[in-house]
Amino acid sequence: MNIVITGVSKGLGLYLCKILLEKSYNVFGISRSKTIELEDLMSMYPDSFKWLNYNLNNTDNIRQDIFKNWIGFDIPIHGLVNNAATAYDDIITNLDIDSLEQMFTVNVFASMILTKFAIRHMLLHNIKGSIVHISSISVHTGYKGLSMYAATKGALEAFSKNVAREWGEIGIRSNCLVAGFMETEMSSTLTNEQKNRIYNRTALKKSVEINSVAETIEFLISQKSNSITGQNINVDSGTI
Ligand SMILES: NC(=O)c1ccc[n+]([C@@H]2O[C@H](COP(=O)([O-])OP(=O)(O)OC[C@H]3O[C@@H](n4cnc5c(N)ncnc54)[C@H](OP(=O)(O)O)[C@@H]3O)[C@@H](O)[C@H]2O)c1
């Protein structure tokens, strides 16, 4: 199965690539930078792991550069994971429109455009594919300073549910993985005190394990979940 994943240079995206490659998927990974960990993974799987240096802020060339020139219309796509995101966090009274627009471009608009072309690709090859968008528990709980970031993820959740309704009839699925707090670069600016406050709001009283998130994404893109669509699946240490 051929899976397109955005944001593969580090964090969840890199880990997800590792899990999928181990399970014999072919991965088409996108990010702006090539980290040492990404290079190592590429050299371990030279045939099944393809990487493209692409800045998703550039939404104009997604069809041409990603789907036409890189993947090619002859190769079927079975899954898309919209994982790349940036987190512009600040209180709303400090809103800077350029930063907000850039975040919406990567987190929302690029994800929508990738979904558009991935579905077209699936239709071309008659594939009942699966799309997974990575959302955040901040949409549902609220965190000081995350209103703008959470708004991008809320938009993705609404988009995912409606795409599921639009394409379900022909077997294409769309779900959101709603992740709780994971220890990655995105969350590295938080102090221990802030982290402990977040953990204390969860039933398991700890951060979310990246492995648990990645395995759930694999479940959602595989046929094991072929009756699940239009859902938000929480992997959040029990933020109840
Ligand atoms: N960490 C958490 O606690 C947490 C909680 C809930 C949800 N999430 C969500 O989980 C997903 C993964 O987050 P993470 O923690 O793994 O983040 P991360 O460590 O910051 O990684 C983000 C990835 O996105 C890529 N990316 C960012 N901007 C890009 C752009 N303009 N073009 C192409 N690629 C771009 C980055 O690659 P380059 O910089 O190399 O381009 C990187 O590979 C995100 O959707 C995030 O919102 C995270």
Image (spheres, helix red, strand yellow):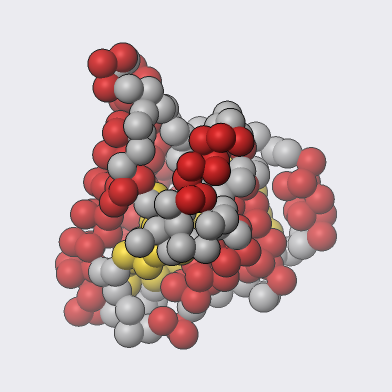
Residue 188 visible in the shown view: yes
Q: Residue at x 76, y 55 (%)?
A: 41
Q: Is residue 216 above or below residue 27?
A: below
Task: Tell which of 3 and 221 is nearer to you.
Answer: 221
- Apparent side of residue 176 relative to residue 87 in the rendered image (left or right): left
Residue 8 visible in the shown view: no
On the image, the x and y values in percent for residue 37 come to: 77, 46
Which corner quadrant of the image does residue 103 belong to?
Answer: top left
On the image, the x and y values in percent for residue 213 come to: 53, 63
Q: Residue at x 26, y 16 (%)?
A: 93
Task: Tell which of 7 and 48 is nearer to you.
Answer: 7
On the image, the x and y values in percent for residue 222 come to: 48, 78
Q: Residue at x 40, y 36 (%)?
A: 106
On the image, the x and y values in percent for residue 172 come to: 31, 73
Q: Quadrant of the C terminus?
A: bottom left
Q: Residue at x 35, y 38 (%)?
A: 143
Task: Tell which of 86 and 178 is nearer to you.
Answer: 178
Q: How many marks?
A: 0
- Apparent side of residue 80 relative to residue 13 in the rendered image (left or right): left
Q: Quadrant of the N terminus?
A: bottom right
Q: Is residue 117 above or below residue 24?
A: above
Task: Tell which of 183 and 228 is nearer to you.
Answer: 183
